[in-house]
Amino acid sequence: MVGRHGGQWPGPRVSEALRRGRGDLQAGYRTLVFDDARSSGSTLVDLDGNEFLDLFSSFGLGALGYQHPALVEAASSDAHVRAAANPTSTPFLTTTDWLDFVDDVVAHYAPRGMSQAFFVDSGGEGVDQALKAAYLRHGERTRVAAGQDPSPLAHPDRWAGWLANAGSPAVVLSFEGAFHGRGLGPLSATRSRPMHKADQPAFPWPVAPFPALRWPLERHADENERATEASLAAVDRVLGTSEVAAVIVEPIQSEGGDRHAAPAFFQGLRRLTAAAGVSLIVDEVQTGVGLTGELWATDGLDLPSPPDFVCFGKKMQLGGFFCAADASITRFGRLYQTRNGDRARAILARATLETIARDGLLAKARRLGATFLSGLVALGERFPGLVTEPRGRGLALAFDLPDTALRDAFNRGTLRRGVFTTYCGPRTVRLRPHLILTESEIDQALAVFHDTLTELACAT
């Protein structure tokens, strides 16, 4: 196997490194061991000197590539050193740096209509906490509607039931193909692969069909419209027959196969949930912080009113959620974690957001995403038996191959030629470039894709 430097891949140093770290329960997944000192931009350099164009970005974790000067400067600052060396429980004890960060993020970088934020360490935790917040909101609303005190502390007659895990009878509605995390709360709303849920307990929550768009859109307009209407009708039935605390949805079902839905679907979903008094949670762990050419994909959906919660993670450097003012939780202890925001990660988050704004990376993601997508469409025309339904929004790009085996063979072939692609769903190639991607790197990727597809076409 030959990497872009022309050396053997995996080379002797990578092969030896892959035999180490076996105490890590996830060591079996590892594909590459890279030299993070020599890697830069969108280029990964492995221990043997082979170079790879990174269209994986660690499942979308990366925003600015490797060794970005803004992040290196932020990580080298005295403020970052102090924040890393002095962990704090931010609700009780913090610094002015943290207060500046929260004020700045909420004022300048939050999704439209969001005025507060809740910070944890990862996207999955953020989804879990948003689900909890939606349930707390639902409980308080239910008591107010019944003419009761909204605080659970005012109802000691119910404490025994709550402590005995009687919990809430309300449910959360999610969608076929969804992925919201692997914690036991988010896992109950995850629908992407049986493997995620096998042997795990789950809440008996309802599911509705996701109106995944067929591509090209102009060829499938009627079919897509019918799917949207059917999905919204299914949601309406659940809202009319169940006590629902929240509906949770991804702007793009990333893990489920990079499946998009029409803006009309999300607009209808917002109308239905608002009319029913049900919280709408938008999971932007994958799509947030610029990937789609908007800082938040939600802002590009033209919703009739903002969602109640927008979850974040990955590129944001921290996890958590934004919420509208009337969705906030004010009673102490109802929503709380010890750290509630890593001050060191916050410094990197702020540097990331400021760089995206300063360097015009949102407009660049829209422009280069369109260029990349047109190249994928051309590959579909050149290899119609292999490449189907190229699709994308900004730099959230994907296409399908006929089956899992061919998809995996494609990813192996591109890696062998020096381009690191990834997967989702049963047969989808998922591309997650860094926001600093260049036109020449798109040309490089498309050339490698062409050669790999030619090899596959000859073998099938």
Image (cartoon, rainbow, N blue to C red):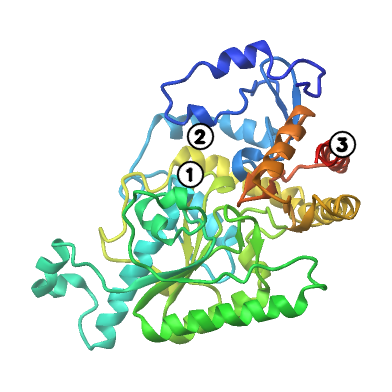
In the displayed structure image, the side of residue 92 where residue 435 appears, left or right: right
- Of helix, strand and loop, which one carries label 2? helix
In the displayed structure image, the side of residue 281 where residue 93 appears, left or right: left
Question: Along the line of sight, which residue is nearer the eye, 2 or 129?
Answer: 2
Q: Position of residue 97 (x, y in %)?
A: 48, 44
Dot 2 surroundings within 10 Å: few (below 14), some, or many (20 or more)? some
Would you name the residue on which mark 3 appears?
451
Please identify, in this view, whether the residue under mark 3 or under mark 2 is nearer the observer: 3
Give me the C-alpha separation between circle 1 and circle 2: 8 Å
| Circles 1, 2 touching at the beta carbon (< 8 Å) | yes
The label on residue 97 is 1
Q: Position of residue 354 (x, y in %)?
A: 65, 48
Name the residue located 50 percent from the left edge and 50 percent from the top edge.
100
Q: Is residue 169 shown to the viewer in this render?
A: yes
Q: Position of residue 212 (x, y in %)?
A: 64, 67
Q: Position of residue 357 (x, y in %)?
A: 70, 52
Looking at marks 1 and 2 on the same chain, the residue that comes earlier in the sequence is marked by 2
Looking at marks 3 and 2 on the same chain, the residue that comes earlier in the sequence is marked by 2
Residue type at mark 3: give it. Answer: Asp
Dot 3 surroundings within 10 Å: few (below 14), some, or many (20 or more)? some
